[in-house]
Amino acid sequence: MSTVMKPTTPTSADPLMIDGVAYHSRLLVGTGKYKDMDETRLAVEASGAEIVTVAIRRTNIGQNAGEPSLLDVLPPDRYTYLPNTAGCYSEADAVRTCRLARELLDGHNLVKLEVLGDEKTLFPDITQTLSAAETLIQDGFKVMVYTNDDPIVARRFEELGCVAVMPLAAPIGSGLGIRNPYNIRTIVENASVPILVDAGVGCASDAAIAMELGCDGVLMNTAIAGAKDPVLMAAAMKKAIEAGRESYLAGRIPRKRFASASSPVDGTFF
Amino acid sequence: MKLIINGKAEQLPEGMSAAQLIEHLDLTNERLAMEVNREIVPRSSFESHILAADDQIEIVRAIGGG
């Protein structure tokens, strides 16, 4: 009879390409705010993420004995580490952080650049971020940049040579969801590098909406780590990202103001 | 000699190398990166890099973060 269609899953047929490297998961996760290393590991595993962000901080001198390290629970040969510049409010601090990260991770040069402008909003300082991106790219870094949802600025980052542009959906950790879907859509339409929503997602439907807008991926931390059950939320996010991507690829129906019947009108006997 | 390590002053013997400092701090098997006076000291140079009095040393690691 009919041949059985093999379902094309986004994981096999539709990789996320960042700087020429293929990733099967379009969900990138942060590793902060978890209860302990066990919960971190379980949530990251449930999310299916292959790229995980990490922060670079001072080693606790004299307090390290026996303490499990992040690199033990999330082995760098299994995950792609994406060191961030969280907490940096200047180009100088961000560049310094990236250089330390590169040394720490044996020359690994993929970084998440964020230069913050304000503690209350954690919105990016765009002028500092632009100059930091330029310096880092000249120094051989592959920069995935956290920015606001401004299409003009997103294009500037792409022109500078950033390997991915990551507009916020809403303030970091706010869980407000995508506040400006039209701008996100415009950013996606203009771009030839991957666009990932970074920050502001609160629940699985937010992640699905980001993907339905055509984003190439979503990076999140608090939405998972701060959930009542982080491991369950990680699993939900994985599905939402996949569902949103498939929905985007499938092409949604146009919105219409009035109904159109699903059952044929012809052949009624009443 | 006095060294400033991650913001705290410590008294340590003269002529100590970066590798000896790491050993002294019990960090030998830790994945870390070191800056001395804002210059990165590559791990491959830890043995040969001799620390000087009043050096400002930062030793960093990767931790959970978004």
Image: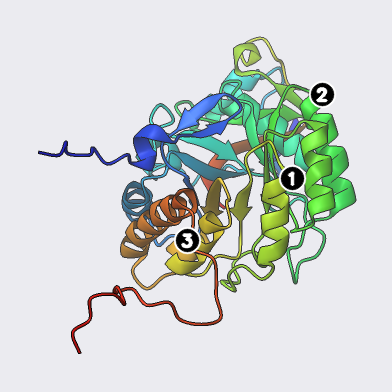
Q: Circle 2 is placed at which residue position?
A: A138
Q: Which is in the foreground here, disc 3 or disc 1? A: 1
Q: Residue at x 79, y 53 (%)?
A: A151
Amino acid on which disc 3 is placed: Ala
> Which sits earlier in the primary sequence, circle 3 or circle 1?
1
- Residue A208 is marked as 3
> Which sits earlier in the primary sequence, circle 2 or circle 3?
2
Q: Horizontally, is A10 left or right of A108 in the view?
A: left
User: Disc 3 is attached to a residue of which chain?
Assistant: A
- Residue A190 is marked as 1
Amino acid on which disc 2 is placed: Gln
For label 1, the crowd category at 10 Å Cα-Cα, with few meaning under 14, some 14 to 19 and many 20 or more, is: some
Q: Is residue A223 visible?
A: yes
Q: Which is in the foreground here, disc 2 or disc 3? A: 3
Spot occupied by residue A145 in the image (x, y as percentages of width and height): 71, 44
Which is more toward the observer, A58 or A258?
Answer: A258
Q: Find out whether the residues at labels 2 and 1 contact each other: C-beta distance under 8 Å.
A: no
Circles 2 and 3 on the same chain: yes
- Residue A254 is marked as none
Q: CA distance from mark 3 to mark 1?
A: 21 Å
Spot occupied by residue A172 in the image (x, y as percentages of width and height): 64, 64
Q: Quadrant of residue B6?
A: top right
Q: Residue at x 67, y 36 (%)?
A: A193
